[in-house]
Image: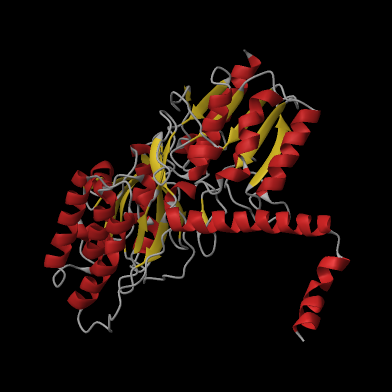
């Protein structure tokens, strides 16, 4: 009986040649290795927060907030950038929230959580400002920082006259001083924080949380209109709509962003950086046709039929077959994504031209977009030129990690687990993200601007692009 069983089980090994079995074994080992690597990466750098056990439905506001603070403990537990000093400040913020859980307004509690996370002082470890205010009434305008000016770039119907206006004061307080009251709600460098703060300035409850308004009340804006006239306008907040389209303030110069039921400033003409609103990445030849202009609005796949990885391969092939006199990469609206999709292209750009490679950057240039810039700078520091405004992070930052939502307040908590250091290199297998440690160990001296060319509102409204103008002028007179 056993003889027949063993004979049957051995039949495949007699029929199929040994080298087929060897190939199958090697393939299984390869796929198994990748699966193990994925699992190891998740365990090492993306620990998933588990909700506290045995939490019932809260019966009071204070109980709900204390439950959220218990769940918020995952930030303290998993944020790997925390030093003893940071942890002490974080704990002090949380202790204050626990002590005042019964008396704080909803906005004060949410802002307190944001300030606790901001003690980490890391751009990737911030809460989302648009999620922060999504559950609160907001004014019928949307604001964005443009080269230091607070501008209205979106309005509801009935407010068309306010479109493009500069906000000089909010409830009698100069706009710069209002913004300063929210600086401690976000960590990271000044350029990045400046892009986030305007999301809070149209929410009266958050203005009230810093002593500038009454919760849900009207807000008076002192404005300089687009035609130069000045006026003061009192605006009532609209009811909260958590499911409404959201956009970071820094993305609002793109007129198509958050377009539903909103009117946007529409620059005249067709500036290159506003072309092809349906694409996240594309390339065209400009100037006399010998300058390659590459737009990367994201480092993730867009909704087209071409993946970002395929796009990067295609662009490299095209530039190899027909080299450009100069290459421009516009990442002023890229918040990052998957750096592996574009690293090879970005590092090889200097090989694809005998001229300069220009990176157009801003405070919105963040995460993987900064890695893209650094990849080119490392490959050819003398031929890579940064144009625009300072990038949105430092050369040392923590990324990866996880974001999760607290169960009662809806606050979006975030922690980071993988270290990147593009100036000194990184050491530590479970400290440095494996990409920065092994796959893409990029080293540069700095990512400072070479040519300051901010996108001012006046240039934007006129359909001009100061950064691209600066590049083309330099190429005409090298």
For residue 407, which quarter of the picture? bottom left
Residue 66 on image: x %, y %: 21, 72
Quadrant location of the C terminus in the rendered image: top right
Residue extending farthest left: 99
Residue 271 seen in the current view: no
Count of numbered circles in the view: 0
Residue 171 on image: x %, y %: 23, 53
Q: In percent of the image, x 58 and y 19: which residue is there?
A: 383
Would you place residue 450 above or below residue 432 in this image? above
Would you place residue 160 above or below residue 470 in this image? below
Q: In percent of the image, x 40 and y 36: which residue is there?
A: 427
Would you place residue 366 above or below residue 104 in this image? above
Residue 56 on image: x %, y %: 27, 84
Report the side of 45 relative to 237 (left or right): right
Front residue (pair 40, 23):
23
Residue 136 on image: x %, y %: 33, 67
Q: In percent of the image, x 59 and y 44: which residue is there?
A: 340
Residue extending farthest bottom: 1
Q: In percent of the image, x 44 and y 23: which residue is there?
A: 445
């Amino acid at each position: 009986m056993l003889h027949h069983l063993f004979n049957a089980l051995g039949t495949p090994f007699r029929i199929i040649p040994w080298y087929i079995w060897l190939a199958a074994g090697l393939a299984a080992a390869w796929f198994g290795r990748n699966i193990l690597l994925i699992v190891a990466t998740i365990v090492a750098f993306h620990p998933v927060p588990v909700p506290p056990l045995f939490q019932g439905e809260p019966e009071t506001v204070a109980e709900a907030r204390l439950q959220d603070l218990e769940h918020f403990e995952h930030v303290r537990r998993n944020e790997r950038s925390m030093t003893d000093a940071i942890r002490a400040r974080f704990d002090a913020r949380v202790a204050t929230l626990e002590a005042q859980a019964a008396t704080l307004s909803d906005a004060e509690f949410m802002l307190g959580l944001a300030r606790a996370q901001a003690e980490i002082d890391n751009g990737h470890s911030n809460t989302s400002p648009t999620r922060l205010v999504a559950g609160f009434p907001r004014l019928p305008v949307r604001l964005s920082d443009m080269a230091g000016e607070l501008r209205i770039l979106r309005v509801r119907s009935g407010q068309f006259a306010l479109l493009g206006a500069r906000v000089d004061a909010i409830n009698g307080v100069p706009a710069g001083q209002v913004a300063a009251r929210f600086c401690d709600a976000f960590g990271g460098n000044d350029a990045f924080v400046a892009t986030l703060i305007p999301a809070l300035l149209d929410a009266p409850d958050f203005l009230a949380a810093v002593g500038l308004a009454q919760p849900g009340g009207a807000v008076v804006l002192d404005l300089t209109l687009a035609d130069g006239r000045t006026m003061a306008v009192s605006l009532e907040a609209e009811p909260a709509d958590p499911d409404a389209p959201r956009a970071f303030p820094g993305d609002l110069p793109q007129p198509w962003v958050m377009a539903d039921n909103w009117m946007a400033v529409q620059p005249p003409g067709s500036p290159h950086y506003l072309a092809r609103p349906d694409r996240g990445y594309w390339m065209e030849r400009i100037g006399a046709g010998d300058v390659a202009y590459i737009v990367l609005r994201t480092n993730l796949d867009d909704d087209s039929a071409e993946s970002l990885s395929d796009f990067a391969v295609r662009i490299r092939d095209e530039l190899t077959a027909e080299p450009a006199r100069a290459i421009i990469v516009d990442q002023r609206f890229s918040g990052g994504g998957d750096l592996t999709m574009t690293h090879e292209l970005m590092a090889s750009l200097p090989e694809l031209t005998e001229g300069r490679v220009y990176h157009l950057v801003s405070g919105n240039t963040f995460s993987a977009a900064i890695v893209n810039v650094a990849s080119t700078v490392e490959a050819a520091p003398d031929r890579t030129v940064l144009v625009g405004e300072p990038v949105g992070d430092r050369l040392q930052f923590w990324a990866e990690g996880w974001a999760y939502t607290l169960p009662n307040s809806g606050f979006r908590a975030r922690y980071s687990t993988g270290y990147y250091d593009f100036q000194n290199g990184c050491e530590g297998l479970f400290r440095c993200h494996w990409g920065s440690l092994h796959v893409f160990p990029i080293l540069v001296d700095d990512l400072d601007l070479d040519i300051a060319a901010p996108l001012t509102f006046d240039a934007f409204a006129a359909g001009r692009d100061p950064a691209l103008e600066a590049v083309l002028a330099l190429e005409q007179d090298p």
